[in-house]
Structures are given as C-alpha cells and as structure tokens.
Amino acid sequence: MVPGTVAGYIPYTIMRNRLADMHIGLFHWSGLLIIITGIIIYLLTAVSFLLKGKGTPAIWFTKAISFVIGEEPLKMVSSGLYKYSRNPMYIGVITTVIGEALYFQYSGLLWYALSLFIIFTFVIIFIEEPHLEKKYGDEYRAYKKRTRRWL
C-alpha cells in the first residue's frame, strides 16, 4: 500500500494535467527501464522480508493495522540486497520515481524524488535505526558498521 501510494498515486497527482517540461527525446524511454529496476529492487526486498525475516515491510508503528499489512520482520534481514545497503527498499521506491520523471519528462517528479530522499533519510536516522537498535541490539549495530546506509 505505502510504496504504491508513494511511487504511484502521489507522482500521478503531481503530474496530472501538467505538460512535459524536460524534452529529452527518445531518452525518455530509459525511464521505463529505471522504473522496472526500481520495482524489482522493491519486490526483492519485500520477498526477503517475507522469506528470511518472517514478516512484511510493515513499519513498527503500524501495529494497529497489522491485520491488513502484516507484522514487521521477526528476524533481521542482512543478506541479498541488504548486504550492500541498509535501505534498498527505499532505494527501489526512489529509483521508480526517478524513472517516472524521465519517462513522463516532468521535472517536478525529480524534485519529488529528492524530497523523498530527504524525508527517508530523516525517518531512517531518527525513527527506524533507533527502533532497530533497540529491537536487534548488537546484531544491528554490527550490521550498521559493515553496511552503508544507502550505497
């Protein structure tokens, strides 16, 4: 629900009734490849949460609606794409939005992608990482030392 809203519905509302303003010619088709890449990144991380973490991408403060979206992972996931980045799920969403900006040739979506990066960074630093340190302790602290936040 959340990635569909953030990478689908919100970009649609941002560019609805607006004309392309980047005029990048045939290069705009590369946006489709970037969109597909972003979606694949997100899906791979969601599957990792399901299979390895025994949970869903649910955020810990969504417990009240867990009957709809599931529970956050019971086990920490640090393999697959998580071996290279602590936040590949967010990277997948931002990548999708950048691809949409190129495909639809609308610069407003690039600004939106930058806004997402800033918002995600603050959420990660001030909410998510402290929660994960509390939940997984030394295992998560060791993971933070060996794996970069983004790339």
Image (cartoon, helix red, strand yellow):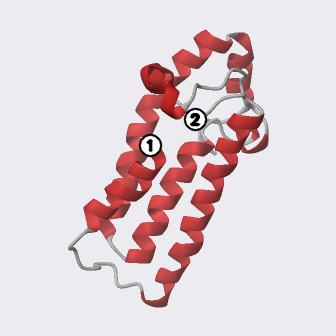
Q: Position of residue 6 (x, y in %)?
A: 40, 49
Q: Nearer the viewer, residue 150 or 72?
A: 72
Considering only vertical position in the picture, is 87 above or below 36?
above
5 vs 82: above or below: below
Dot 1: what SS? Answer: helix
- Judging depth in this view, the residue of 39 and 140 nearest the camera is 39
Q: Residue at x 52, y 33 (%)?
A: 69
Binning the other alpha carbons within 10 Å of mark 2 as few (below 14), some (14 to 19) or many (20 upward) gives: many
Label pair 2/1, CB-CB below 8 angstroms = yes
What residue is drawn where x is 72% and y is 28%?
54
Residue type indicated by callout 1:
Val
Location of mark 1 (residue): 2
Q: Residues within 10 Å of mark 1 (few under 14, many from 20)?
A: few
Q: Position of residue 29 (x, y in %)?
A: 52, 82
Point out the tag, 2 or 1, that comes first from the N-terminus: 1
Q: Residue at x 47, y 48 (%)?
A: 3
Write down the residue under mark 2: 57
Secondary element under disc 2, as helix, strand or loop, is loop
Q: Which image quarter: residue 85?
A: top right
On screen, residue 103 above or below 11: below
